[in-house]
Image: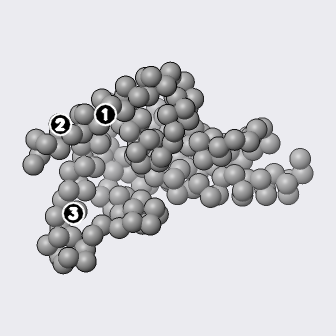
Amino acid sequence: MSERALAERFNEVVLPHLGDALALARWLTGNAADAEDVVQDACIKAHAGIAGYAGGNSRAWLLTIVRNTSYTWMARNRPRGMMAVGDLGDLDDMAAAHGTSLPDEDGPEASLIARADTAALEAAIAALPQPFRETLVLRDINGLSYREIAAMLAVPIGTVMSRLARARGLLASELGRAS
């Protein structure tokens, strides 16, 4: 393929999903600055591999690259025991990217309660064990199918379903205690 054709393919396959890539990287790395570094590295890898992209779900293809790049980046740049929690503003950015927003039409009090609920949810998700958090984010935030998640994580679909059920149960339990 010519350089021009590769660039056009990259623009068609990768660029529409950069918001989702950044959101996934934020959840995996725990903050916006690290996520931007990861997505930049992932884009370089995607550009290098765009000629080999065989079609199919381009979003899942890119998110797989982002996931793998995130773990490689964190292994290189962070101590093993360190777990960062993302910024509350990240959820606002993600909600805006998906065409939703936190409710504030009921006034400042309702907005404050919604933000507190969002913070509790964010903290509960961040506290999940990594396999459960990752599965929950890929399914419930990024909207990938069970089959796409199974392929991305190299696990059976039943494992994806089990992890998702466990993650949701842990979240419900944690959020129930916080009430």
Residue at 22% across, 62% down: 115
Under tag 3, what secondary structure?
helix
Q: Residue 123's x, y, as percent?
A: 24, 46
Q: Is residue 28 above or below residue 92?
A: above
Residue at 18% across, 78% down: 107
How far is mark 1 from mark 3, CA to CA?
Answer: 22 Å
User: Does residue 139 appear anywhere in the picture?
Assistant: yes
How far is mark 1 from mark 2, CA to CA?
Answer: 10 Å
How far is mark 2 from mark 3, CA to CA?
Answer: 19 Å
The image's colouring method is one colour
Residue type, numbered disc 1? Ala
- First along the sequence among labels 1 and 2: 1
* Residue at which label 1 appears: 167
Q: 137 and 37: which one is in front?
A: 137
* Residue at which label 2 appears: 173
* Residue at which label 3 appears: 114
Residue type, numbered disc 3? Ala
Q: Based on the displayed image, in which of its 4 quarters is residue 154 positioned?
A: top right
Residue at 48% across, 46% down: 143
- First along the sequence among labels 2 and 3: 3
Residue type, numbered disc 2? Ser
Q: Based on the displayed image, in which of its 4 quarters is residue 105 positioned?
A: bottom left
Q: 97 and 74: which one is in front?
A: 97
Q: Based on the displayed image, in which of its 4 quarters is residue 33 positioned?
A: bottom left
Q: 77 and 86: which one is in front?
A: 86
Q: Residues within 10 Å of mark 1 (few under 14, many from 20)?
A: many
Q: Residue 46's x, y, as percent?
A: 68, 44
Residue at 42% across, 59% down: 94
